[in-house]
Image (spheres, coloured by chain):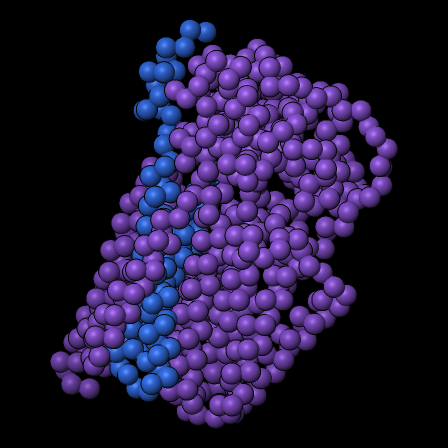
Amino acid sequence: MNSSSNLIDALFIFVLACFIGFEVIRRVSPLLHTPLMSLTNALDAIAVVGAIVLVGEHKSTLSAVFGFIAVVAATSNIVGGFFITDRMLKMFKSSRPASKPAANSVAK
Amino acid sequence: MTAEFAGGQVAIELLYLIASVLFIFSLKWMSSPTTARHGIWAGEIGMVLAICGTLLHHGIVDYRLIGIALVLGTIIGVPLGNVAMTAVPQRTALSHAFGALCVTLVGSAEFYLRSPDISRFMMAVLSLEVILGGLTVTGSLMAAGKLQEILPQRPLTYKGQNLVNFALLAGAVVIAITLVRNPGAQSLFPFMILIALAFGVLLIIPIGGADMPTVISLLNGYAGLSAAAMGFVLGSKLLIIAGALDGSSGLILSIIMSKAMNRSFTNVLFGAFGQVQTAHAGGEEAKPIRSATPEEAAAILSAANRVIVVPGYGMAVAQAQHKVRELYDALTKRGVDVRFAIHPVAGRMPGHMNVLLAEADIPYDRLIEMDEINGDFPQTDVALVIGANDVTNPAARSDASSPIYGMPILDVDRSHTVMVIKRSMNPGFAGIDNPLYYLDNTLMLFGDAKAFVGGIVRELGGGHS
């Protein structure tokens, strides 16, 4: 992991992922910028995997304690982040299917 | 390494690969409200796969503690996912703090486990991780405190503020460089974290409410970049990808927000917020204004063919979105075409107005972005401004001496009649006078947004439908 070729690999992945991120997120409708932020926040909490390994390996008391708090913080982001994103997206409704009858009944 | 372990390792990496792909699809599906909910599923499945894969990790000996932590996090996470929609900006800031806390703690633990056997590059990335993480923790907590109104919302500025901030940052960088050259200097490490934490606090002190959308986006970007740095430290490709996605999302949003406020991105990046808030003290002479009652406003609105509503933070503060929905219903029933013009920095975070109006059941195809709707104002009978100020200020277009000159605005002044619901003639938060209020075609509607819109709805004869 410490060899320089692995670092270069990691840099390649980082740069390419940034390009994908820019291209994908540029296309997100501004309508959904708030849910986008809570979603990326939940995805970002994937950092929990590093914390889980720290707790599980229990190499020192410090690493276990730090890891434990980190797992709690990241898990609350995962659960809360997905939950609120879903709640927000459920609220976004189009007028086309739902309120068509109402629009037609308008006599003007 | 035995063949068995290598096989397990490959399985874990494959799970991580699938999770990465799902994360990218998750964001891709956010491009439209019709597919966005698939995006959540993709994200959730990816997350579960990644966590399961991690639990297979051969070095793990203590599952009990992991279980307790996961349960505890869930217990905290559920109420955080259940907050009222009006509290979403502060919840978002708080979750940036949690994410950054995780990254900072893991980075610190890794440092003490590996020191002094850390390569130069690794130490540099690790320093970046904990500095970015640390300042995001306290910065986000400060932002959340300001949004929740636990902390004073007014920007606090003092002489030499930028100098102090840069000196602190320089101090952190010096420690980082020392550690890169000598990773065994364990006693220096806590100071680097402390400086980063202090820097986060000082970074947010000068920030006012109007700058919050930019700041929240920026903190989002910092949280993502620190997570990507953590991916480098741990050699986790999945984390590098997730961090890069989150980081680029935060940076794109910051760029959009800073453009919408006419700030250069570098200006925003270095935290030089709050400087434009110099009050425009001249022109104190009483200019004539025209005001109207709810009855008069209702009469004008019902005679209109096209109405554009311009919501702002004032609507959120007054919790007027449900009354606005009743107004929308009452006018739509009378055949009036009602649309909503959304300025990118209206409210306290990107997309804030859209979420509030969607919560009030206003169809999303009625919510129109600034660039799309601006050309329609000249053909609009009434522009109804509810709790928005600077984003409608025509001085941004015409008055080169105005502090907001050059900022893109909604051209409400070009519609036939402008109605502005406002508590009083006090200039807004930024202290900038708005010439819109003195135009011949402007009617001021003085009062609380919720009560006033409710009054109009009563006049139109539509209660809750």
Q: Which residue is drawn at 38% across and 61% down?
A: A44
- The residue lying at 64 percent from left, 19 percent from top is B293
**Residue B322 visible, this angle:** yes
Q: Which color has been applied to chain A in this rendered view?
A: blue
Tell me: residue B432, above or below residue B376.
Answer: below
Where does the image place residue B458, in percent across and percent down from the top left?
51, 17
Q: Position of residue B140 (x, y in %)?
A: 51, 61
| Residue farthest toward the left in the current orientation of the protein | B4
Asked where in the image residue B56 lies, by quadrant, the reply is: bottom left
Indicate the quadrant containing the N terminus of chain B: top left, top right, bottom left or bottom right: bottom left
Q: Which residue is drawn at 23% across and 62% down?
A: B49
Task: Work out whether residue B153 or residue B400 is closer to the camera in this orientation and state it.
Answer: B153
Residue in the picture at 79% in, 44% down: B280
In this orientation, does residue A3 appear?
Answer: no
Q: Looking at the picture, tell me which residue is in the foreground, B344 or B387.
A: B387
Figure check: B14 above or below B431: below
Q: Residue A67: percent from the left, percent from the top?
A: 34, 76
Decide if residue B200 is on the left or right side of residue A26: right
- The quadrant of the rendering that contains the C terminus of chain B is top left
Image coordinates of residue B94 in percent, x first then y, are 46, 58
- Looking at the image, residue B313 lies above or below residue B139: above
- Badge count: 0
Q: Chain B is drawn in which colour?
A: purple
Instruction: In the rendered view, tell whether residue A57 sits above or below residue B204.
Output: below
